[in-house]
Image (cartoon, rainbow, N blue to C red):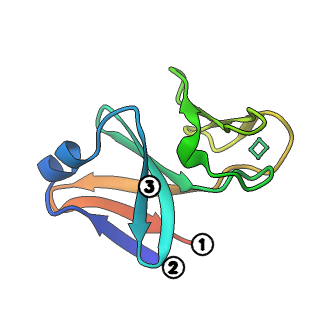
Amino acid sequence: MGTFTLGKSRGQVLDMIPEWTINKIHVGEQVIALVRIDVNFHAFQTECPHRGTSLIHGSLTDDCEIICPLHYYRFDLKTVAGKVGSCGDLKIYDTELTDEGLKIFILSV
Ligand code: FES
Protein backbone atom coordinates (compact mmCIF):
# COMPACT_ATOMS: atom_id res chain seq x y z
CA MET A 1 0.00 0.00 0.00
CA GLY A 2 2.63 2.55 0.95
CA THR A 3 4.35 4.69 3.50
CA PHE A 4 2.41 7.39 5.30
CA THR A 5 3.79 10.18 7.43
CA LEU A 6 1.86 11.40 10.42
CA GLY A 7 2.67 14.93 11.55
CA LYS A 8 5.47 17.20 10.40
CA SER A 9 8.06 16.69 13.14
CA ARG A 10 9.04 14.38 15.99
CA GLY A 11 7.79 16.88 18.58
CA GLN A 12 4.47 17.38 16.85
CA VAL A 13 3.82 13.63 16.78
CA LEU A 14 4.71 13.25 20.45
CA ASP A 15 2.38 16.14 21.31
CA MET A 16 -0.41 14.82 19.10
CA ILE A 17 -0.48 11.18 20.24
CA PRO A 18 -1.02 10.68 23.98
CA GLU A 19 0.64 7.71 25.66
CA TRP A 20 -1.28 4.56 26.53
CA THR A 21 -4.36 5.34 24.49
CA ILE A 22 -5.70 3.57 21.43
CA ASN A 23 -5.90 6.14 18.66
CA LYS A 24 -7.84 5.79 15.42
CA ILE A 25 -5.70 7.07 12.55
CA HIS A 26 -6.58 7.57 8.88
CA VAL A 27 -3.78 6.59 6.51
CA GLY A 28 -4.91 7.20 2.97
CA GLU A 29 -8.30 5.51 2.71
CA GLN A 30 -7.54 3.06 5.51
CA VAL A 31 -8.15 3.34 9.22
CA ILE A 32 -5.64 1.82 11.61
CA ALA A 33 -5.03 1.88 15.34
CA LEU A 34 -2.00 3.54 16.89
CA VAL A 35 -0.64 3.26 20.41
CA ARG A 36 2.28 5.22 21.82
CA ILE A 37 4.32 3.93 24.74
CA ASP A 38 7.04 6.44 25.56
CA VAL A 39 8.63 7.08 22.12
CA ASN A 40 7.63 3.68 20.72
CA PHE A 41 4.65 3.50 18.39
CA HIS A 42 2.58 0.41 17.63
CA ALA A 43 0.34 0.56 14.58
CA PHE A 44 -2.10 -2.27 13.90
CA GLN A 45 -5.36 -3.21 12.23
CA THR A 46 -8.47 -1.94 13.95
CA GLU A 47 -10.49 -5.13 13.43
CA CYS A 48 -10.00 -7.99 15.84
CA PRO A 49 -8.78 -11.09 13.92
CA HIS A 50 -11.32 -13.22 15.81
CA ARG A 51 -14.69 -11.75 14.78
CA GLY A 52 -13.87 -8.27 13.56
CA THR A 53 -14.86 -6.17 16.54
CA SER A 54 -13.16 -2.79 16.65
CA LEU A 55 -10.09 -2.82 18.85
CA ILE A 56 -10.32 0.97 19.19
CA HIS A 57 -12.56 0.23 22.17
CA GLY A 58 -10.22 -2.41 23.57
CA SER A 59 -7.92 -1.96 26.52
CA LEU A 60 -4.17 -2.04 27.01
CA THR A 61 -2.19 -3.96 29.58
CA ASP A 62 1.10 -2.95 31.16
CA ASP A 63 2.75 -5.70 29.06
CA CYS A 64 1.79 -3.96 25.81
CA GLU A 65 -1.07 -6.27 25.00
CA ILE A 66 -4.38 -5.17 23.60
CA ILE A 67 -7.50 -6.88 24.86
CA CYS A 68 -10.49 -7.16 22.55
CA PRO A 69 -13.64 -5.78 24.15
CA LEU A 70 -15.90 -8.57 22.86
CA HIS A 71 -14.37 -11.94 23.86
CA TYR A 72 -11.28 -10.62 25.64
CA TYR A 73 -8.70 -12.26 23.38
CA ARG A 74 -5.28 -10.70 23.85
CA PHE A 75 -2.72 -9.68 21.27
CA ASP A 76 0.87 -8.78 22.01
CA LEU A 77 1.70 -5.56 20.17
CA LYS A 78 5.42 -6.34 20.38
CA THR A 79 5.31 -9.78 18.75
CA VAL A 80 2.02 -9.63 16.75
CA ALA A 81 1.01 -12.99 18.14
CA GLY A 82 -2.36 -13.75 19.59
CA LYS A 83 -1.74 -14.62 23.23
CA VAL A 84 -5.07 -15.65 24.67
CA GLY A 85 -7.76 -17.15 22.46
CA SER A 86 -7.36 -18.90 19.14
CA CYS A 87 -7.56 -16.93 15.93
CA GLY A 88 -5.16 -15.38 13.46
CA ASP A 89 -2.49 -12.91 14.45
CA LEU A 90 -3.10 -9.21 14.61
CA LYS A 91 -1.73 -7.34 11.61
CA ILE A 92 0.99 -4.96 12.77
CA TYR A 93 2.53 -2.16 10.70
CA ASP A 94 6.10 -0.98 11.12
CA THR A 95 6.62 2.57 12.30
CA GLU A 96 9.61 4.88 12.54
CA LEU A 97 9.68 8.17 14.41
CA THR A 98 11.77 10.63 12.39
CA ASP A 99 12.48 14.35 12.42
CA GLU A 100 9.87 14.64 9.64
CA GLY A 101 7.10 12.86 11.56
CA LEU A 102 6.00 9.30 12.20
CA LYS A 103 6.44 7.00 9.22
CA ILE A 104 3.89 4.19 9.05
CA PHE A 105 4.57 1.39 6.59
CA ILE A 106 1.36 -0.15 5.32
CA LEU A 107 2.19 -3.24 3.28
CA SER A 108 -1.32 -4.61 3.15
CA VAL A 109 -4.51 -4.01 5.07
S1 FES B 1 -14.10 -10.43 18.38
FE1 FES B 1 -12.24 -9.99 19.41
S2 FES B 1 -11.98 -11.67 20.70
FE2 FES B 1 -13.79 -12.14 19.63
Q: Which residue is mark 3?
A: 24
Compared with residue 59, is residue 25 higher up or lower down, i.e. above or below?
Answer: below
Q: Which residue is mark 1?
A: 108
Q: How far across and how far down the image is residue 102, in percent?
A: 28, 57
Circles 2, 1 touching at the beta carbon (< 8 Å)? yes
- Say left or right for 103 vs 45: left
Question: How far apart are labels 3 and 2 at the CA level?
Answer: 18 Å
Residue at (61, 40) in percent of width and height: 79
Q: Secondary structure at mark 1?
A: loop
Mark 1 surroundings within 10 Å by alpha-carbon count, few (fewer than 14), some (14 through 19), many (20 or more): few
3 vs 2, front mark:
3
Q: Earlier in the sequence, mark 1 or mark 3?
A: 3
Q: Which mark is residue 45?
A: none
Q: Which residue is mark 2?
A: 1
Residue type at mark 1 is Ser
Residue type at mark 2 is Met
Q: Earlier in the sequence, mark 2 or mark 1?
A: 2
- Say left or right for 45 vs 70: left
Q: How far across and how far down the image is residue 87, in percent?
A: 84, 47
Residue at (41, 77) in percent of width and height: 28
Is the shortest distance between ligand 1 and the CB of mark 3 under 8 Å?
Answer: no
